Amino acid sequence: MELVKIEDLLEKYFQGETSIAEENELRNYFSSSNVAQHLEQYKPLFGYFSLAKEHQFTPEIPILPRPRDKKRNVAWISIAASVVVLLGIGTYAYYSADVVNKNQDLGTYDDPEEAFRATQKALSLLSDNVNVGIESVLYIQEYQTTKDKIFISTKKQSGGS
């Protein structure tokens, strides 16, 4: 009779329908020495649960670096960052000073006639660019006029004011 009850409890256990008391009864049965031959295969399963219950987890806590070491690392990183920034500024200053020295020739002329021709050339170029800009503004004004005519005629046709 007990064997039938154990088989029924096993069936309920694998269906996930057992209570804690029924699971304890299964655990006690499989930890005893008189387990039926055809149920021997389940003995390691319930034996494992018994062993796992007795086992306590003791995690190892890693040793953290001392705060003094951390401060020392931050100090070295700060020094290294400062050196990199200073090297960057120095490199920029060196190359920008070199470019400024090359651009010291600002188009100064010894001959007044040559200076006059260069000035006329520069003013002519400026005038051409201004004229292109004025032509663009004229196109925009023409577009605006045409747009106003179209919208006025559509308002009159739709009976608007």
Image: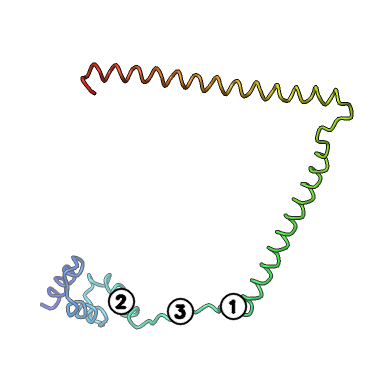
The answer to which of marks 1 and 3 sits earlier in the sequence is: 3
Under mark 3, the amino acid is Pro
In percent of width and height, residue 9 lies at 16, 72
SS at badge 3: loop
Name the residue: 67% across, 67% down.
78
SS at badge 2: helix
The residue labelled by disc 1 is 65
Query: Above or below — where is 119 with respect to 98?
Result: above
In percent of width and height, residue 29 lies at 22, 80
Query: Above or below — where is 124 with respect to 93?
Result: above
SS at badge 1: loop
Name the residue: 75% across, 22% down.
121
Could you say which quadrant of the image residue 110 lies in? top right
Around disc 3, counting alpha carbons within 10 Å, would you say few (fewer than 14), some (14 to 19), or many (20 or more)? few
- How far apart, in angstroms, are the residues tagged by discs 1 and 3? 19 Å
Q: Which mark is residue 59?
A: 3
Under mark 2, the amino acid is Phe
